[in-house]
Image: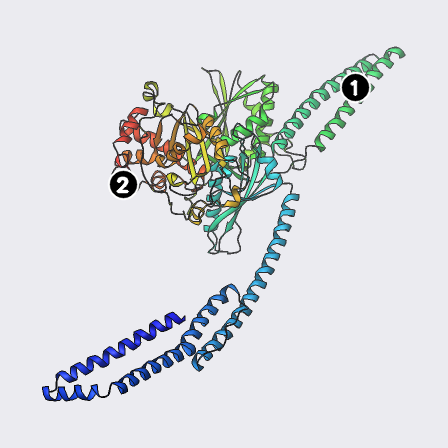
Amino acid sequence: MTTARFSLVLALLYTVLLGIFGLLFLVLSASLPPAQQELLAQLLSSRLQLLFALALLLLLGLGAALNALQSRYLQPLARLSEDVALLSANPEHRATVQGAAVVRVLTDKINALATNFQMLQSDVQTRIAQANRALAAEKNRLAALMSELAQCVLVCNIEGRILLYNTRATELLEVHDATGTTIGLGRSLFGVIDRDLIVHALEQIQHQRQQTDDPAARPVSDFVATLANGQLVRAHMAAVLDGSNALDGFVLTLEDITRNVAAESQRDALLQLLTQDTRAALANIRAALETMQHFPDMSSQKRSQFTAIIDDESQRLAHRINQAEQGRSTSQSEGWRFEQMRGIDLIALLQRRIETPALRIDSNIESIDSALWLEVDSYALTQSLAYLTQRLAAHCDVDTLHMDLQRTERLAYLDIVWRGAPVTVETLQSWENTPFQLGATIPSTTLTAVITGQGGDAVYQFDQIQQTSRYRLLLPLATERAALDIRIKKSARPEFYDFDLFQQSGQTAALDQQLLSQLSYTVFDTETTGLQPAAGDEIISLGALHIVNGRLLSHENFDQLVQPKRKLSAESTAIHGINDAMLIGQPAIEKVLPQFHRFAQDTILVAHNAAFDMRFLQMLEARTGICFTQPVLDTLLLSQVIHPNQAQHSLEAIATRLGVDLVGRHTALGDAIVTAEVLLRMVPLLAEKGIFTLKQARDAAQQTPYARIHY
């Protein structure tokens, strides 16, 4: 306590005491008779020096008491408080023992606690350092192991965001297109692998987990996929579980099988060539031998000529056999297990495997149900059908095959159709029951055995009127799985509508009258540093994909992280999972936005709660010179048009109502995929309400409550 403060406190105490004594004197004197009051006044006036001395003694006593209180209690406690505050910054600091006995005891106790705290903190720091060293060593070993793996390995969270990948993954999954899309930490896996494949594999894993009570069981899922760059891969998925044994992510290993398919095609072509050459050589040898047998008296010169023919043909045959053996040794292949596979991927695989310059495959993949899944041995099935089509091409002069795949209640019909004369029952049975080699290391089998092994059947039909033959395979559908039970993070994005989306300058009368089912859309979503674009929040991720002719083109996507000019908040990272480290080295919005503008050109923009995303784009117009003028549809408003009596119109609520899986939420591309699937399911529901064109949809959306709210 400073001298001035001490003097002020002493003066206040002294004044208070004098005031108390004076008040007591007044009360006492007021109760006395007048004569006694006068006598008391005379007595006090004669004792003024004594009263002054007593007042001075009182002042000195108060000063001594206050000084003792300050030095023994107040100052030591104030210093002790400062010492305690220092302990958190400097665990080695100790409080000075001083003051009264009780304060000294308290100081000793605090110093003892500080010593224990320092020991515990030192032990914790030592353990943390050891754990960090062990973690770094494990990380280095894992990185070294993954870098040496021949297979592509990715680790993703349940939302499809890539958390870890190896060099082989970069080589296999890199997509070179106008947007420069490639894989990377924090990006969505759905940019290179169809989201439906991942969802189906996760559902299969969940189904396996529900079928067993063994905690040590490790459910997996296998499937075949076609990548955005056209490559065929065989995928193996394993689940990653969190501390509560709930599905938290997955590990995906991918093996490129494009060359395997090409090698099998090359092997079959070599086998066919060998067969033709063998027949020709044997025919020449047989003709020479028969001639020599019929003319035993021929001249030695003629006999030498025929002997030379036999020798040449036999050597040519031996050479061709050696070539075939060499070709066989370079096309080693292994048998494949039954796997979950989409029908459209099976047709694409068959087309890739069977089609040659002499045999064209015609298939309308657009008409095949994208939700049709099969459970087949794709390797054996494609090899068998390749064998069948080779027989058709060789014996029936077939140069064009049409393939189609349709769903029935319990089975799928895979039809192979061609024009020309019918195949006899005997010939077809011969082809079905003649053994052929599936692969170099796989025993011979028959077409019938392969089809039966798939749990299917085959039927041959001939249409007299159309003069077409149909070979129909009845294949088993994959077992349907229950919807994924995944805990979805609550969205922190507010629903608001604070500018007019209905008067975009790119709106034209021609667009107004087009049917919703015939328009081309760019469905997009953004992740941001926060929720206030006007306050400086920025876009950190932009994801989008196209819908053309009512079909979601999952491989035509845009997925890009963006380096902002401000740090991310902990609240935003908790929502979308993107942190500052993921954004280091990413391009700025000035580079990304022109790419996205080209990607979305000549399409209708679609988003959920579009005002939020469009506000961010609008705020960037002055900075980038990029302006989005095309019409905008908002699934939030369209949901109110379709279901005006529903209380919830969040993306999660709408997706649940319409049966859309919520895998991939809170990534820009993942949210865009969910929004796109929601829009495709909304179009027929809008038609039921008499809303068919873009103008009708926009007019209806403009009448909804959210569209009339301004902030």
Decide which of 461, 376 is in the foreground and name it: 376
Give me the disc on residue 213.
none
Decide which of 711, 27 is in the foreground and name it: 27
> Taking 25 as reference, is 132 above or below it?
above
Residue 71, percent from left and from top: 43, 77
Give me the disc on residue 313.
1
> Taking 501 as reference, is 159 above or below it?
below
Q: Residue at x 38, y 70 (%)?
A: 4
Give the foreground label among 1 and 2. 2
Decide which of 645, 30 is in the foreground and name it: 30
Residue 217 visible in image: yes
Q: Amino acid at mark 1?
A: Glu
- Residue 318 figure quarter: top right
Q: Residue furthest left?
A: 34
Q: Amino acid at mark 2?
A: Gln
- Colour option used: rainbow
Q: Which secondary structure lies at badge 1?
A: helix
Can you identify the residue that label 2 sits on?
A: 646
Q: Quadrant of the N terminus?
A: bottom left
Residue 586, percent from left and from top: 53, 38
Residue 395, percent from left and from top: 60, 19
Q: Residue at x 23, y 81 (%)?
A: 21
Q: Which secondary structure lies at badge 2?
A: loop
Image position of 672 (left or right of 21): right
